[in-house]
């Protein structure tokens, strides 16, 4: 993502927060999906609410990347998807396992319409990732969209 695209996306987020949804949509230039990355390890429903709010304000769809081996929170995700549907938000879920960073990179590489990625905590990004993997660190720097970290009770931060 170049600086102009990033500026447009941040402007769109600002317009959306201010209730100027049409202007936000104009600035997004065809990017119309929010990727919510969650795991069984750091499962936090406040991240779902944040992602749903952004989708409602921008008119975006929601893709959930669920990092799991046991589907411990399968019922919670199904309930959230039903809630998103009632709110008129297109929602899909993709299950995977392994390294969260790599899963996000792979997903965003295949899906060019991702506006940004929403994740609950910084430690969640490192689930099952081997420390010191230089190639993954280099690839992470090339993430093509902003990364939003949402901690319970905190304001989101943009990485």
Image (cartoon, rainbow, N blue to C red):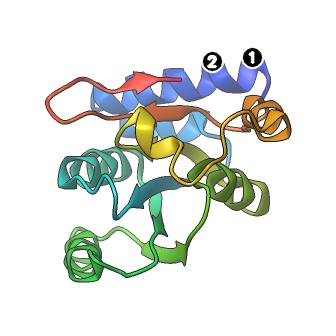
Q: Position of residue 28 (x, y in %)?
A: 60, 39
- Name the quarter where the N terminus is drawn: top right
Instruction: From the viewer's side, name the closer residue of 99 and 29.
Output: 99
Dot 2, how many residues are within 10 Å of its Cα: few (below 14), some (14-19), or many (20+)?
A: few
Q: Is residue 59 left or right of residue 159?
A: left
Dot 1, how many residues are within 10 Å of its Cα: few (below 14), some (14-19), or many (20+)?
A: few
Label tally: 2
Above/below status of 146 relative to 62: above
Say whether residue 53 is visible.
yes
Above/below status of 80 relative to 5: below
Q: Quadrant of residue 147?
A: top right
Q: Is residue 120 left or right of residue 45?
A: right
Above/below status of 7 relative to 107: above
In the rendered image, the residue lying farthest to the left is: 153
Residue occupying image coordinates x 40% and y 58%: 38
Instruction: From the viewer's side, name the closer residue of 14 and 121.
Output: 121
Residue occupying image coordinates x 27% and y 57%: 43
Q: Quadrant of residue 19?
A: top left
Residue occupying image coordinates x 63% and y 53%: 104
Above/below status of 155 relative to 72: above
- For the residues labelled 1 and 2, the Cα–Cα distance comes to 6 Å
Say whether residue 117 is visible.
no
Residue labelled with disc 2:
7
Pointer 1 and pointer 2: residues touching (CB < 8 Å)?
yes
Instruction: From the viewer's side, name the closer residue of 85 and 133.
Output: 133
Residue labelled with disc 1:
3
Instruction: From the viewer's side, name the closer residue of 89 and 63.
Output: 63
**SS at badge 1:** helix
């Amino acid at each position: 993502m170049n600086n102009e695209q990033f500026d447009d996306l941040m402007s769109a987020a600002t317009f959306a927060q201010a209730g100027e949804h049409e202007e936000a949509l104009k600035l997004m230039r065809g990017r119309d999906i929010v990727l919510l990355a969650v795991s069984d390890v750091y499962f936090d429903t406040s991240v779902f609410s944040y992602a749903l709010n952004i989708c409602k304000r921008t008119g975006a769809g929601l893709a959930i990347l669920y990092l799991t081996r046991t589907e411990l929170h399968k019922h919670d995700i199904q309930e959230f998807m039903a809630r998103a549907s009632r709110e008129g938000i297109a929602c899909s879920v993709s299950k995977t396992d392994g390294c969260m960073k790599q899963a996000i990179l792979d997903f965003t590489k295949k899906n060019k319409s991702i506006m940004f990625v929403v994740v609950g905590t910084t430690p969640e990004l490192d689930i099952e990732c081997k420390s010191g993997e230089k190639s993954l660190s280099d690839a992470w720097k090339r993430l093509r969209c902003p990364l939003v970290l949402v901690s319970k009770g905190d304001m989101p931060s943009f990485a």
